[in-house]
Amino acid sequence: MSDFFETHLSKTDDRLLTKWAHYFEIYTRELSRFRERPITFLEIGVFKGGSVPMWQAFFHPESRLLFVDIDQDCAKFANANAHVEIGNQADPEFLAQISAKYGPFDVILDDGSHINTHQIKSFTALWPHIRDGGLYLVEDCHTSYWPGFGGGYRNEASFIEFAKRLVDKMHSWYTDQDALFPFHPIAKELHSVRFYDSIVVSEKQLKTDRPTTLTAQNGTVSRSQRALDIRGRTSIFAGKDGS
Ligand SMILES: C[S@@+](CC[C@H](N)C(=O)[O-])C[C@H]1O[C@@H](n2cnc3c(N)ncnc32)[C@H](O)[C@@H]1O
């Protein structure tokens, strides 16, 4: 755990904080680069308010922090630098309203209901409101393996399976099976999908061009996108062992 979180946990007040212990290392790894400048941050899920002071202390003091919960009682955790909006994370209209009012966001953290359909609905509605270079984190993704949360091992309706399909879409530039696996436009803005134990991080990076191959010889660099247009590809490198 980083010094920040270690120190913060020992200084918490009566606003209860609930997080899995191994998340703090992931937060440090993923979010430290957002600390140096004011950002716009949204966390879904407030509960007893413990994460409000934690994120306020973690991010730059001029950051805009928004917290969302379905429980009206959570409104009391708003303060001068932390907004709280009450609504349902599975309601696209509510999410559109808060995005118009507070977005675009640098970082969104879904620590809400952990119901798989909710996680997918929130991601789908909010991903367009993530800034270039921003992150969308979904936590407690172990509920993808819990039938009681709409998950279950390899259940297509789980968030983990949804995120695996994002990985496919990210690679759809390279399709060799256009009918089965067509190009998906999210490839133009999905930099990476990182799977941790129970946290999935999707990073946005607007790409101005298609992936390009580089060859360099005697100081001359050549670029090509031809490989993307070929179909029925076979390897020019394979088979050297006779296979
Ligand atoms: C895990 S707690 C949040 C914990 C908090 N982030 C923390 O770190 O201490 C989950 C919260 O999600 C809220 N929630 C449940 N269903 C929701 C929904 N459909 N939309 C928005 N919030 C929801 C619950 O009311 C609860 O307060």
Image (tube, rainbow, N blue to C red):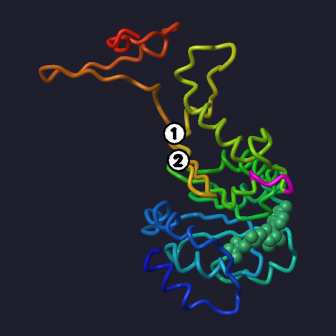
Image quarter hosting the C terminus: top left
Badge number at residue 184: none
Q: Are marks 1 and 2 in contact (CB under 8 Å)?
A: yes
Q: Is residue 105 left or right of residue 7?
A: right
Q: Residue at x 76, y 81 (%)?
A: 48
Most common secondary structure along the magenta stretch? helix
Could you say which quadrant of the image residue 90 lies in? bottom right
Q: Nearer the viewer, residue 209 or 141?
A: 141
Q: Is residue 50 left or right of residue 70?
A: left
Residue 220 picture location, percent across and down:
17, 20
> For numbered disc 2, what is the local secondary structure?
strand
Residue 140 picture location, percent across and down:
69, 61
- Whether residue 83 is visible here, answered yes or no, is no
Residue 100 picture location, percent across and down:
72, 55
Q: Of callouts 1 and 2, which one flags the residue occurring earlier in the amino acid sequence? A: 2
Q: Nearer the viewer, residue 241 or 64?
A: 241
Residue 17 picture location, percent across and down:
67, 80
Q: Which residue is under mark 1? A: 206
> For numbered disc 1, what is the local secondary structure?
loop
| Relative vertical location of residue 238 with respect to residue 40 in this rendering, above or below | above
Please tell me whether residue 88 belongs to the stretch shown in magenta. no
> Gap between marks 1 and 2, in whole Å?
6 Å
Badge number at residue 132: 2
State the residue lying farthest toward the left: 218
The verdict on label 2 being within 8 Å of ligand 1 is: no
Q: Residue at x 74, y 51 (%)?
A: 144
Query: As shown in the figure, which amino acid type bears the numbered disc 1?
Result: Leu
Q: Residue at x 79, y 51 (%)?
A: 116
Query: As shown in the figure, which amino acid type bears the numbered disc 2?
Result: Asp
Q: Nearer the viewer, residue 114 or 91?
A: 114
The range drawn in magenta is 144-148
- Whether residue 135 is visible here, answered yes or no, is yes
